[in-house]
Image: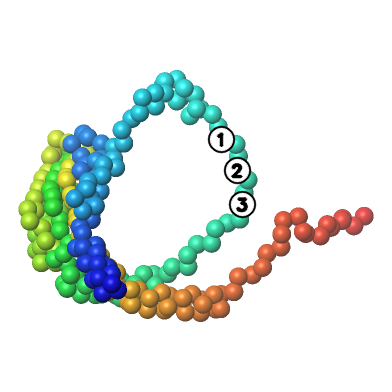
Amino acid sequence: MWRWILLSVCVLLALLCLTRVGVEAAFGGGMPLRLDVRLGPLRLHILPGKKRAGQEKPEKEKKARKKKKKPPEKPGPKKKKLPLEPEDIKDGLRTLFPALGRALRRIGRGIRLHPFRLSLTLGGREDPAAAAENYGRAQTAVWNGMPVLERLMDIPEPSIHTGVDFDAAGTEAEGDVGVTFRIGTLLALGFGLMVPALGWLWRFWRRSRKRAAANPVSETKPAGGDEKTTDAA
């Protein structure tokens, strides 16, 4: 009996690792952002949400609520910022990027970009020279980046269009992008990045301790705790 149970568990784990999950987004073209999530054969619609009956409120009520001022918030304790220095960022990039590249070379073909349709139109009415220069940069990024992506991932039908409209003032972007991957691929990618990420966190923690010891924060007296002084007659 336990053999059948173990075999069933192994089959379920294999099916789970082979299950594809992902997300698909469509934007631009004067339409609101559309976002769908895929879980195996199921597709769940996330954005835009459906409006229920009676959900819309009159415009006057909305404007009246906007005009209401919020009560002044009491000053609370300041949140401590993460002591992230440029040295830590450079160390993270040097550590994680090679590990990510190695992981993608091993398992990246399990990640699929489909559909992959992007259209970028640069506006050049205000500064045609800058728009032409940006167009050249965009073309260079596409021609240099797409071969790398196609080697690392499965992109069946890529479609990227860049252009310049010297009669338009702003830049317009439109696209339909979907990325799916197997759960097993995601787990393998996470395990491949876990060891380098832990090493970077350990080095970051040690550098933070050294910086804190080198620059101790001076204690400040609480408000209202100063002694009163009197003028001499």
| Disc 1 target residue | 70
Q: Are marks 1 and 2 in contact (CB under 8 Å)?
A: yes
In the depicted structure, whether residue 116 falls above or below residue 99: above
| Disc 2 target residue | 73
* Residue 76, disc: 3
How far apart marks 2 and 3 lie (CA) works out to 8 Å
Q: Position of residue 76 (x, y in %)?
A: 61, 52
* Residue 1 appears in the picture as rendered: yes
Residue at screen point 37% across, 78% down: 199
Classed neighbour count for the residue bearing mark 2: other residues with Cα under 10 Å, few (<14), some (14–19), many (≥20): few
* Residue 6 appears in the picture as rendered: no
In the depicted structure, whether residue 106 falls above or below residue 131: below
Kindly state the secondary structure of the residue where label 2 is placed.
Answer: loop
Kindly state the secondary structure of the residue where label 3 is placed.
Answer: loop
Q: If you read the primary sequence from the N terminus, does the residue marked by circle 3 or circle 1 appear first?
A: 1
Q: Is residue 11 left or right of residue 227?
A: left
